[in-house]
Image (cartoon, grey):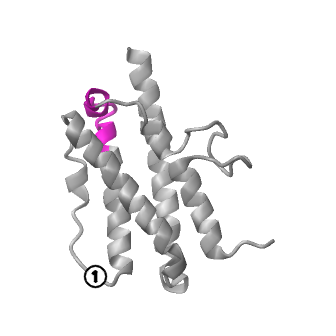
């Protein structure tokens, strides 16, 4: 059965955030928990606060959340000044802030995922495609940061 464009976008977003399904992967590692959520699972606030290659895992995670929020807000018809630098200022966090960042990321992702079928994809296709590319880029960065973190322990 042929997938619709919305279904295809949802499949790629799910792989990026939730990891590949049982049918294999399109571009990530096919092992379980290789999406953003699985990659962040088990990290504590101390690890998420360490500066690795000039940034923190917490900052990358919040930046992904902010990007999703920006795209959803723009699709909703609101034009505003974007503050891309704000998410990159996150460094030292505690467990409560780390939980807040991860919960916010999940909330923005699941909200966008639910809205995909209602979005005018002719108008917003580039933006929605960009969420896949942007998030996949940061998934790779997060995984490399974690490899560095593990090698230093």
Q: Residue furthest top?
A: 153
Quadrant containing the C terminus is: top left
Camera-side residue of 132 and 53: 132
Q: How many marks?
A: 1
Q: Position of residue 150 (x, y in %)?
A: 43, 20
| Of residues 103 and 140, the one drawn nearer to the viewer in this rendering | 103
Seen in the picture, residue 144 relative to 89 is either above or below; the reply is: above
Mark 1 Cα-neighbour bin, 10 Å: few <14, some 14–19, many ≥20: few
Residue at 19% x, 34% y is 94
Is residue 81 a member of the stretch shown in magenta?
no
The residue lying at 63 percent from left, 70 percent from top is 7
In the rendered image, the vertical position of residue 78 relative to residue 139, given as above or below = below
Q: Position of residue 103 (x, y in %)?
A: 33, 50
Tell which residue pokes out farthest to the right in this image. Answer: 1
Magenta includes 48? yes
At x 29%, y 37%, the residue is: 56
6 or 56, nearer to the observer: 6
Quadrant of the snapshot with the N terminus: bottom right
Say whether residue 131 is visible: yes
Which x, y percent locates residue 110? Answer: 44, 61
Residue linked to disc 1? 78
Q: Quadrant of residue 55?
A: top left
Q: From this view, report whether residue 90 is shown above or below residue 45.
A: below
- Element on which disc 1 rests: loop
Q: Which residues are magenta?
A: 45-59
Would you say 22 lies left or right of 148 here? right
**Residue at horizontal 64 percent and vertical 67 percent from the top:** 8
Say if residue 64 shows up in the picture. no
Q: Residue 29: x percent and y percent?
A: 63, 39
């Amino acid at each position: 059965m042929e997938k619709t464009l919305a279904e295809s976008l949802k499949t790629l977003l799910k792989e990026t955030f939730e990891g590949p399904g049982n049918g294999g992967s399109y571009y990530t590692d096919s092992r379980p928990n290789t999406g953003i959520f699985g990659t962040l699972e088990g990290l504590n606030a101390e690890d998420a606060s360490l500066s690795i290659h000039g940034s923190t895992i917490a900052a990358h995670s919040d930046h992904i959340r902010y990007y999703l929020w920006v795209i959803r807000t723009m699709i909703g018809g609101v034009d505003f000044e974007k503050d891309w630098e704000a998410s990159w200022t996150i460094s030292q966090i505690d467990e409560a802030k780390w939980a807040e960042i991860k919960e916010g990321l999940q909330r923005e992702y699941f909200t966008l995922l639910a809205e995909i079928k209602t979005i005018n994809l002719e108008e917003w296709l580039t933006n929605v495609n960009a969420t896949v590319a942007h998030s996949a880029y940061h998934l790779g960065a997060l995984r490399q940061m974690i490899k560095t973190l593990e090698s230093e322990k």
